[in-house]
Image: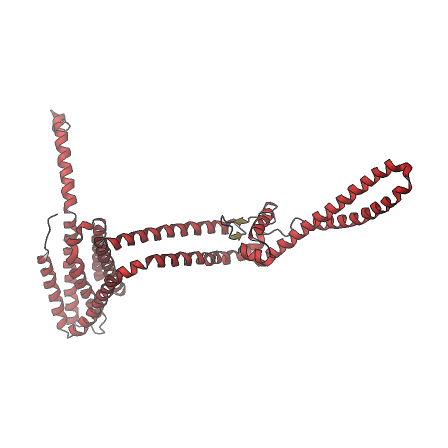
Amino acid sequence: MDKKDFSDLENQIKDTVKSAFNAIDFVNLKKGINNKADDALNGVKTKFKDKSDDVIGKLRNKSQEFSEKMESKIQNQHTNLSKVNKKEKNKAPVYIVKRPIGSISGVVYKVLGYTGSLVFGILLMVYSMLTPLFPQFLTNNFIFLGFLSTFFISSIGLSFRGRYLRNRVYRFKKYVKILDGENYCLIENLASDIKKKNKYVVKDLRKMSELGMFKEAHIDEKQTYFMLSNEVYDNYLKSQEALKQRNEEELRRQEKSNEEKNDPAKRELRFTIDMGQNYIKQIRSVNDALPEEEISNKLYRLENIVIQILEHIENNPKKLPEVNKFANHYLPITLKLVNSYKELNEQAVQGDNIKNAKNEIEKSIDFINTAFEKLLDDLFEEVALDISTDISVLETLFTQEGLTKKDFEN
């Protein structure tokens, strides 16, 4: 595309805008409205001027901000799980067995073990004392002592088994109490309350889950959280995936910021696009406050054209010089007009002069829309030329190969 000055276009816009503001003069409102519009415009310029001045400083602090954001996101993970947990809190008992394994059997084992240990221990002691008194039955005595010893050791084993089962039931009830109706808990908190290490608690919880004491329990890969239900675990996995994606996006933004820091052209491109998007945001804000459908449609059209121009420039950075006037002159003038229209529309009395002034601004916006569309179309001039060239080359090749319609007719 040939480089164009666009000075004629700028002059036409200025003439049209001048007509609009002359119409505003009829109602002696130009001074007040212009001041308010200028304040808004100056606010935008000041904001982006400040942004341009300290952009390098911000980029230098980007790494620190990134680290802080990551830390904040990890901390917020606990909060996100809490939100999910509140919805499911009443369902927590459903995922916990009412009578854990060992509640009854542990007691039975302990009673049998303690009783057997006492009885067989006494018998073993007494028989050991009597055995030397009957040497003629020495072999039988040793066999009987062997049986007593076996039963005694077995009884001790039963008592230890019962104690183990009862201790596990005690820890299970302790875990349930710590959960307190919640659907998840930090393993660190569980370990702290029962005075055990995290690894011990993880192994303990997994064993209880295998035995069905916790019906749908899960432990995350990092062994940080204990979750009672499949639903909470699925939500946790989704939140982890979302966090991973946010981290990747943040890393991409970090890399992009570093590139812009080292490349003035990219920094200028980003500055122009951000400024244009800010203008769009302000125009949209005014549009939302206007009840009239006709002017809203004009502003929607304006917004859409500006968005397309910015997207094209973002994808084709080499064309940034061609939209300098668009970004630095046309958009500020357009925003000023839109703000002026809003001020006029808010006047309590809508006399003929105010209506005429509003009509002039609407006509100006129509002209600006047409001008911006022409600018957008000019930006695609090279694309259209390339397409035309490709079509011409194809037609030439088809003609040389005898593949045209005319060749088939012959």
Task: Name above or below for residue 406 compared with residue 64.
Answer: above
Q: Nearer the viewer, residue 202 or 10?
A: 202
Task: Name above or below for residue 30 compared with residue 125.
Answer: below
- Looking at this rendering, what residue extends furthest in the bottom direction? 28
Q: Nearer the viewer, residue 174 or 125?
A: 125
Q: Report the side of 256 relative to 349 (left or right).
A: right
Tally the numbered discs: 0
The quarter of the picture where the C terminus appears is top left
Q: Position of residue 121 (x, y in %)?
A: 81, 47
Q: Position of residue 149 (x, y in %)?
A: 79, 42
Q: Nearer the viewer, residue 2 or 123?
A: 123
Instruction: Residue at 73%, 48% (x, y): give it.
Output: 159
Task: Name above or below for residue 336 compared with residue 151.
Answer: below
Instruction: Residue at 56%, 55% (x, y): give it.
Output: 92
Q: Work out whether residue 300 can be spotted.
A: no
Q: Position of residue 238 (x, y in %)?
A: 44, 50
**Way the structure is coloured:** secondary structure
Q: Nearer the viewer, residue 356 or 198?
A: 198
Q: Report the side of 177 relative to 135 (left or right).
A: left
- Looking at this rendering, what residue extends furthest in the top direction? 410
Instruction: Residue at 38%, 50% (x, y): give it.
Output: 245
Q: Report the side of 328 relative to 164 (left or right).
A: left
Task: Name above or below for residue 111 compared with residue 35.
Answer: above
Q: Position of residue 28 (x, y in %)?
A: 15, 75
Q: Work out whether residue 178 can be spotted.
A: yes
